[in-house]
Amino acid sequence: GMVGVVHATSPIDAIQRFVGRVELGMIPSIIDTVVFIENGQVKKVFELETVVKIPHGLREADLARPVVVVRDFLTGEAEYELYVFGERTFVVPVKRTSTARVRKMESAIRSVIRKYIPDEEIEIEMAKNGNVIVYVDTEYYNVLLSSKARRKIERVGKRYGVNIMFRPKLG
């Protein structure tokens, strides 16, 4: 193997520097691993591979083409896809950034809970396993466990496909 240094502000920027200079399918042969170092710390490690598939975001089966998949080295999860469509090369983030969906869900949860307790007493946390944890002041905790409030909140959870749990706010 060989080590090379490319200066860039993010690991995908370093990979994109090769996009116009080398045929896209050759990039994983030239760069198989990207180690991104920021402030002396290893921040991200990517591995690259070429696969023939339908690129992320496209639906038609006849659009299958060679795609360079950029994966997180530690988790194996795809983060970006690079592919040529027509004359252009696309770099598409694959990671599911459901921030709009999460904000919508938080808003729906807050609007239901707000009917029972003051808004400033609510803290909503998204757990890694897809659950939602709502922290409320201990004095309001039993109010949310009443059957009417609980049913309405469970309905919101079903709509978004998550399990909503309540925990008393400590401190």
Image (cartoon, rainbow, N blue to C red):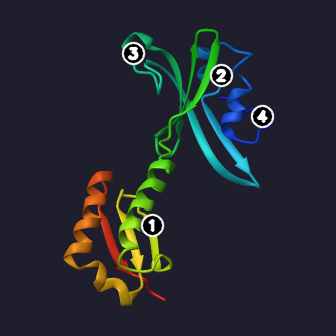
Identity, as a three-letter code, of the amino acid under mark 4: Val
Q: Secondary structure at mark 3?
A: loop
Report how far apart the C-alphas of labels 1 and 2 lie in the structure.
42 Å
The amino acid pointed to by label 1 is: Glu
Of labels 4 and 3, earlier in sequence is 4
Which numbered mark, 1 or 2, is in the foreground of this view?
Answer: 1
The mark nearer the N terminus, 1 or 2, is 2
The first of marks 2 and 3 along the sequence is 2
Picture coordinates of residue 4, whole percent (x, y): 75, 32
Gap between marks 3 and 1, in whole Å? 37 Å
Q: Which residue is mark 1?
A: 125
Is disc 1 surrounded by few (<14), some (14 to 19) or many (20+) residues within 10 Å? few
| First-in-chain label (2 vs 4) | 4
Q: Nearer the viewer, residue 145 or 26?
A: 145
Towards the viewer: 113 or 76: 113
Q: Which residue is mark 2?
A: 30
Residue 61: quadrant of the picture = top left
Q: Are marks 2 and 3 in contact (CB under 8 Å)?
A: no
Classed neighbour count for the residue bearing mark 3: other residues with Cα under 10 Å, few (<14), some (14–19), many (≥20): few
Q: Residue at x 29, y 66 (%)?
A: 153
Q: Is residue 56 left or right of residue 47?
A: left
Q: Secondary structure at mark 4?
A: loop
